Amino acid sequence: MRKKRHCFVVKMGSGELSHTSTQVLEVQKDNQKTTGTQQEIKADKRNFFQVALIDVQNFIYFFAPLIFIHLAACTIKPYITSDEKGPWEILWNKFVDTFGEDRYRYYVWGSLIVTSTFYWTSAGLYAIMDFTQWPKFLMKYKIQPDKNVPVDLKRFLKVVLTCQINEAMNIPIWMVGYRRWSEQSNADIRFLPDVYTTFLTLFVCMVCHDTLFYHFHRMLHHKAIYKHIHKKHHEWQAPIAATAVYAHPVEHFLTGVISPGVGILIMAPQLPVTWLWFCWLTFQTQNDHSGYHFPIMFSPEFHDYHHLKFHTSYGWLTFWDWFYGTDIEFQKTTVNRDRHFRMHTTSSARQLVPDEKPKSL
C-alpha cells in the first residue's frame, strides 16, 4: 500500500495571534495552497513499484559502463601480460611503485589531484561545446537551445573561481578524516577489493547520497535560507557542466562534501574505489547540469527543469521527489515530462517530443 506523502507547511510564530483581516487572508491562502498540493499528490497515478522500477533502471545504467570497462580490461589483459594479478591490481601497483606508499599523501593530495583533474577535464569538454557550438551535430541535443550561445566568458570565469574555492575546502576535511579512514581501511596500500565489494561500496554511496542530497537540497530552498545560500547556484537558469559545484560554501559542504561522503565514511574503501566514486558521481552531476540530453546517458531534463522553475524536482533519482510529491509540477508539464527518458536513438529529445504549438486565438 502506498505510503502517505508529506507536505511541508510554514508554521506561524508562537504568541497570541492577531485576528486581523490580513492574517486571515494569509491563512486562507496557505490552506488553499496546501489543499491544492494534496489533491495533486492524490491525482499522481504512479505507485511505489513503478517508481522503484525507474530507479532500479537508473542504478543499472550507473553501473553498466563500469561493468563493461571491467570486463573489457579482463579480456584484453591476457594479450598484454601473463601476470596473474587482475588488470586493476597491475595498474595500481605500477602507480604505487612510481609515487611511493605514503597513505596520507594519497588520501589528501592524491584525492585533490585526481578529483580536480577529472572535474575540469570533463567540464572542459562540455565548455568547448558551449563556447564554440561545435561539433554542430551535437547541438541538437541542447535542452534550452537559445541559452548560452555562446557562454558569457565573465560568468564562466566566476564559476571557475568559485568551484576551485569549493574544491580547496576538501583539503582540511580530508586532513581531519584521514585518521578515521586509516584505522578502518586495509593498511596495505597495494590491496584492492574484489569487484563485488567495489560495486557494493558504490551502491551504498549512491543510496546515501541520493537520500541526503534530496533533503539538504530541499532544505536550502526554504524561504528563510534560499536567498542567503542556495540562490548563488540558481544564478544559472540554464546551467552548464562546470556549475555542478558552483555554490555557496555552506551548500557545497552539505551537498558536495557530506552527501557524497557519508557512504565513504561507512564503507572506508581503498583509495582507488573512493576516487572512482567521486569521479563517476562528478560525471553524473555534470551531465545533470550540462544542458545537453545525449543518447544513453541519464536524462538531465529533470534537473534542468529544476533550474528553470526552482521550487520543484529536488532529487537526483526519482524516489524521494515522488514520496514527498515535490515533482508534481514537473509531472504536469507534458513536454518536459515526456522528454525525461533515456534515449536509445540518435534523434534528440526535442525531435522525439516536439514543443507544443501555441494555441491559435
Image (cartoon, grey):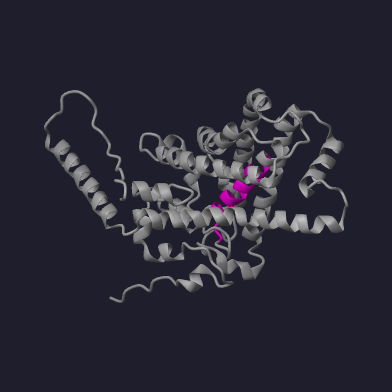
Residue at screen point 34% across, 54% down: 328
Q: Position of residue 172 (x, y in %)?
A: 64, 26
Q: Quadrant of residue 272?
A: top right
Q: Is residue 285 magenta?
A: yes
Q: Name the foreground residue: 36 vs 212.
A: 212
Q: Name the foreground residue: 326 vs 149.
A: 326
- Would you say 15 lies left or right of 47 here? left
- Would you say 5 lies left or right of 355 here? left
Given the current orientation, which residue lies at the most extreme front position?
84
Residue at screen point 51% across, 39% down: 208
Residue at screen point 29% across, 52% down: 41
Q: Is residue 270 visible?
A: yes
Q: Position of residue 23 (x, y in %)?
A: 16, 36
Q: Position of residue 98 (x, y in %)?
A: 86, 38
Residue at screen point 84% across, 32% down: 100
In the picture, the quarter occupied by the C terminus is: bottom left
- Would you say 65 lies left or right of 359 here? right
Q: Is residue 305 visible?
A: no
Q: Position of residue 215 (x, y in %)?
A: 43, 39
Dominant secondary structure, magenta: helix
- Would you say 21 lies left or right of 337 here? left
The segment highlighted magenta reads: 275-292
